[in-house]
Amino acid sequence: MDFQLSEDQRLVRDTARAFAEEQVRPLAAKIDAEARFPTETMGKLAELGFLGIFAPPEYGGAGLDYLSYTLVVEEISRVCAATGVIVSAHNSLACFPLMQFGTEQQKERFLLPLAKGEALGAFALTEPEAGSDAASQKTVAVDDGDAFVLNGSKIFITNATVAKVFLVFCLTDPPAGVRGITCLIVERDAPGFSIGKKEETLGIRGSGACSLHFDSVRVPKDQVLGEPNRGFRVAMTTLDAGRIGIAAQAVGIIQAALDESVRYSKERKQFGKSISSFQALQWMIADTSTELAAARWLTYRAAALKDAGEAYTLEAAQAKLFASEMATRAAHRAMQIHGGYGYTREFVVERLYRDARITEIYEGTSEIQRLVIASQVLK
Ligand code: CAA
């Protein structure tokens, strides 16, 4: 067992940390306040290879391992969880399934520009009636010779304001239910495809989440990702990997909550001394620090298993469940330590508190993670 990051992984982490401090932090409060996608950051992320972190170099990627991706998402999320999820969704929900299920021609045409960071990708599974029950798709694609004709809507799609490539799940054989779902690669400029309203969210307000609408969109059959009617497997395999990214985002938020708590509790004086000298606060900081360590190691373990080519469905769900619940708890404590100031927009903890909450919801709620964990433990 090795608890050390390799030299390369440490270099990636340090590069991501410096980038996050210099380029991401200055925009974090602004994109949150304006609910604006940080378009200006995308070119810089691409230059560092952070939009194709684990994609192979022959498809434009940086060819790093999944643990390195985890480190990048953690470091970026530490300063801006919205930018963190943009990077996470693009890498693990768009590049990864194209790597895993794409044909050679699909990799050349779609993965390459995504991994080079010339375009962003999005993953479109969720619908108004298909949240936790992801198989309950209403979006339908009808076979029409050399193409499928797609009709329906999606909601809460991260990166949608700017993404060029969308992986869209739909029913191609409605009576077959979960075995009648297909994943289609849809381009932003496909006739009949429109981006709907931007979601007004509590946190991660810069993540570009929108609804999508498909009005008789013709999608050529060579844009089926994986096999027709086997799309649910594509979705589940992708989410197993994606959940490690959300766990990493949550770890970044916990670290930020701890950083802010330590700094403020040392500076703030009440009753004639720093509030960090009070045991009540020391215990809060001790608990956050311990939960951070546990969340981080669960997350790195899941990533390391994936890198080793081993099964990781269980470990990814455990990491996502634990890290996300600890992020909410850490942000709650950080706000408590800041008192009334923490409840204002002047202090970072107010944003952390709002951003943390979604990590318990997207890419599978905590209840779905428990369901996945139990089904793995009891099988
Ligand atoms: N890997 C591969 N295949 C899997 C799998 C996995 N981890 N889990 C299930 N499958 C396969 C099963 O083997 C089965 O295949 P067969 O039909 O060939 O036997 C098929 O999928 C159906 O499996 P289940 O009967 O278990 O499926 P279910 O309908 O009961 O659903 C679920 C299972 C775990 C609840 C699933 O619906 C789920 O994960 N729900 C949560 C959805 C979710 O996470 N949504 C997130 C949206 S994306 C997002 O949030 C992105 C963002 O904004 C950042």
Image: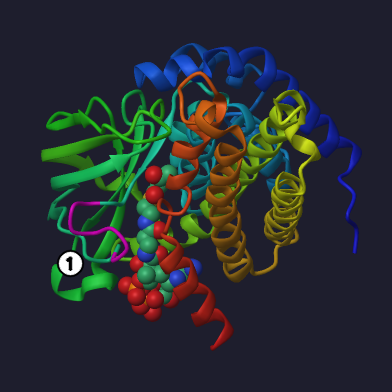
Compared with 76, 220 (above or below) is below
Depth order, front residue of 215/250: 250
- Colouring of the image: rainbow
Query: Quick check: 239 left or right of 74?
Result: left
Q: Which residue is mark 1?
A: 173
Which range of residues does the magenta coloring cover? 127-133
- For the image shown, how many numbered marks are present on the structure? 1
Q: Position of residue 42 (x, y in %)?
A: 52, 18
Q: Position of residue 239 (x, y in %)?
A: 47, 56
Q: Say if the magenta span includes residue 311.
A: no
Q: Quadrant of ligand 1?
A: bottom left
* The quarter of the displayed image where residue 216 is located: top left
Amino acid bearing label 1: Asp
Q: Residue furthest left?
A: 216
Compared with 125, 346 (above or below) is above
Residue at 41% x, 30% y is 207
Depth order, front residue of 23/97: 23
